[in-house]
Image: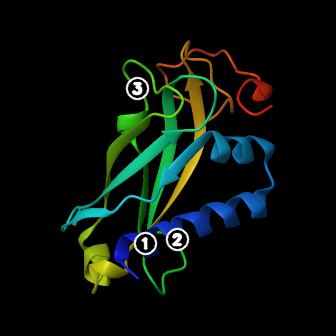
Amino acid sequence: MTRNTLTSLTATLALSLSSAAQADPILDCLSQAVEVSEGSLYSIDERLIRADVTATNRSGIAFSGLHVEVAAHYPGRPTPLASRAVTDFITLGGALLPGEDATGRVAMHIDPRIRGIVEDEDQITFSVTVQNVADAGGANIAGQPKMASWPDDELPLRSICP
């Protein structure tokens, strides 16, 4: 099994467990509307873990922004090493139309102690959660978290997930 396949399986499992545990209709809707493929580790150094993440619009509407959270995990650790939103997705120039993909890089800040914990970089896995989306007009579905550039308008859930 290749590393990317294993990472994708980990992402799918993390998303499935997250949705099942929370049973939140908004998060369930978002996980259907935006498919995220678990990105691959781009690099790790003394200060940053970088990963690439791809999001695909599976809804019937255009998105002008996505709030996607990535967390880096390491075996034997009960909490993530680091987590951060993918800032490349906050504003999507020209919008992300149905069926289109967007790839972004996330840089998660770490302290040197964390780098010392990671003995094998291939053991780092990522979980990705879509927490909110903004339609072409900037209206968002979940209310929070939302970006300052998005208006206060909220999008009805049924407009994305009937």
Looking at the rendered structure, which numbered label has been put on residue 158? none
The residue positioned 39% from the left and 18% from the top of the image is 94
Mark 2 to mark 1: distance in Å?
A: 6 Å
Q: Return the disc, 1 or 3, that comes first in the chain's sequence.
A: 1
- Disc 3 versus disc 2: distance between alpha carbons? 27 Å
Q: Nearer the viewer, residue 87 or 81?
A: 87
For residue 158, which quarter of the picture? top right
Q: Are marks 2 and 1 in contact (CB under 8 Å)?
A: yes
Question: Along the polypeptide, which appears first: circle 3 or circle 2?
Answer: 2
Residue at 51% x, 38% y is 67
Q: Of tags 3 and 2, which is closer to the observer?
A: 2
Q: Amino acid at mark 3?
A: Leu
Q: Which residue, given by chain and number where applicable, does mark 1 sit on?
A: 5
Badge 3 marks a residue whose secondary structure is loop
Q: Residue furthest left?
A: 45
Image quarter hosting the C terminus: top right
Q: Residues within 10 Å of mark 3 (few under 14, many from 20)?
A: some
**Up-down: is 70 above or below 56?**
below
What residue is rendered at 70% in x and 29% in y? 160
Amino acid type of the residue that numbered disc 1 sits on in the rendered structure:
Thr
Nearest to viewer (mark 1 / mark 3): 1
Q: Circle 1 — which element?
A: helix
Q: Residue at x 69, y 67 (%)?
A: 17
Q: Does the image show residue 73?
A: no
Q: Which circle marks residue 92 in the picture?
A: 3
**Up-down: is 37 above or below 142?**
below
Q: Which residue is mark 2?
A: 9
Question: x%, y% of residue 28?
Answer: 73, 48
